[in-house]
Image: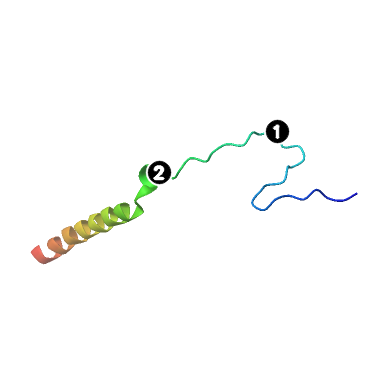
Amino acid sequence: MTDQRIPPNETPPAEGAIAEAHRERPDGGIWEHPGLWLWLIVVGAALVAGFFAARLAGG
């Protein structure tokens, strides 16, 4: 018996698959702009470091 030809970019049917095809949600939410979160973390760390540097300098 010969295998059925599957056209390119087509997913062959899987045995026992009961789920219907669905569209994936696009990425989004708070992870849409990770650079913003990195910037906020860096600024917060610099503020904390500045606080300790000021305490050391002040005596």
**Residue 32 located left or right of residue 25:** left
| Residue at image coords 72%, 46% | 12
Q: Quadrant of residue 58?
A: bottom left
| Residue at image coords 64%, 33% | 20
Q: Secondary structure at mark 1?
A: loop
Residue 59 in sight from this viewpoint: no
Mark 2 → mark 1, Cα distance in angstroms: 28 Å
Q: Residue furthest bottom?
A: 57
**Residue 52 located left or right of residue 29:** left
- Specify the label residue 18 is tagged with: 1
Q: Secondary structure at mark 2?
A: loop
**Residue 31 located left or right of residue 21:** left
Residue 33 is situated, as x and y percent measured from the top left of the image, at 34, 51
Q: Quadrant of residue 59?
A: bottom left
- Nearer-the-camera pick, 13 or 54: 13
Q: Residue furthest right?
A: 1
**Residue 45 located left or right of residue 2:** left
- Nearer-the-camera pick, 21 or 56: 21
Residue 23 is situated, as x and y percent measured from the top left of the image, at 54, 38
Residue 51 is situated, as x and y percent measured from the top left of the image, at 16, 58
Of the residues shown, which amino acid type is indicated by label 1? Answer: Ile
Residue 6 in sight from this viewpoint: yes
Of the residues shown, which amino acid type is indicated by label 2? Answer: Gly
- Specify the label residue 28 is tagged with: 2
Q: Residues within 10 Å of mark 2 (few under 14, many from 20)?
A: few
